[in-house]
Image (tube, helix red, strand yellow):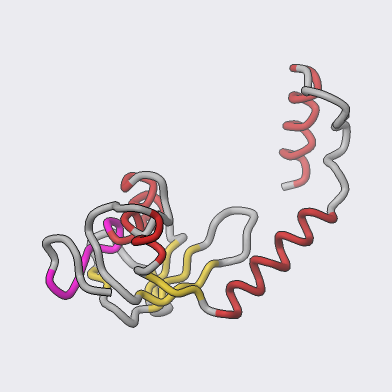
Amino acid sequence: MACMGAGADRVRLDKWLWAARMFKTRGQATEAVQGGRVHVNGQRAKPARDVRPGDSIEITRPGHSPMVIVVTGLSDRRGPASEAQALYEETQESVEARERDRMMRRMAPPPPGADLAGRPTKRDRRRFEDARRRSR
């Protein structure tokens, strides 16, 4: 894919993550990078780090297996999802790990104290949150 936006052959990491629709806002992308949840080529990065085609980016989200992608295109503007998907390619191992996680979550029993018969009451929600805090 051709390079879009002002950057010729490199784009800031936080802008690229936002343009590739990995995060809903650029602020969230910056927070994730600063929080150590994004690694470029196996090393922790800063939000202003330049990303180039061929770079490997590992994104870790709480409760999910890490997503490993390879940069195939550059953009510093957020466009349609079809354009965003052309900016990267996810590794096969990453796809398989995410699929395994998805299946495990599907097959997991419901959280303790959760009555799935209807909309949870305020009391149900408090029980659910308490159980989640204890399980961490």
Whether 121 is drawn above or below 38: the answer is: above
Is the N terminus in the top left, top right, bottom left or bottom right quadrant?
Answer: bottom left
Left or right: 50 with respect to 67?
A: left
Percent of width and height locating residue 84: 36, 61
**Residue 44 position by quadrant:** bottom left
Camera-nearest residue between 80 and 26: 80
Whether 101 is drawn above or below 88: the answer is: above
Percent of width and height locating residue 63: 64, 54
Camera-nearest residue between 37 and 68: 68
Percent of width and height locating residue 78: 29, 52
Percent of width and height locating residue 96: 66, 74
Q: Which residues are magenta?
A: 8-15
Work out which residue is located at the far top of the displayed protein and give it: 122
**Residue 86 position by quadrant:** bottom left
The residue positioned 37% from the left and 52% from the top of the image is 29
The residue positioned 33% from the left and 67% from the top of the image is 45
Left or right: 106 with respect to 55?
A: right
**Residue 12 painted magenta:** yes
Whether 122 is drawn above or below 7: the answer is: above
**Residue 49 painted magenta:** no
The residue positioned 29% from the left and 63% from the top of the image is 13
Camera-nearest residue between 81 and 56: 81
Tally the marks: 0
Left or right: 10 with respect to 63?
A: left
**Residue 122 position by quadrant:** top right
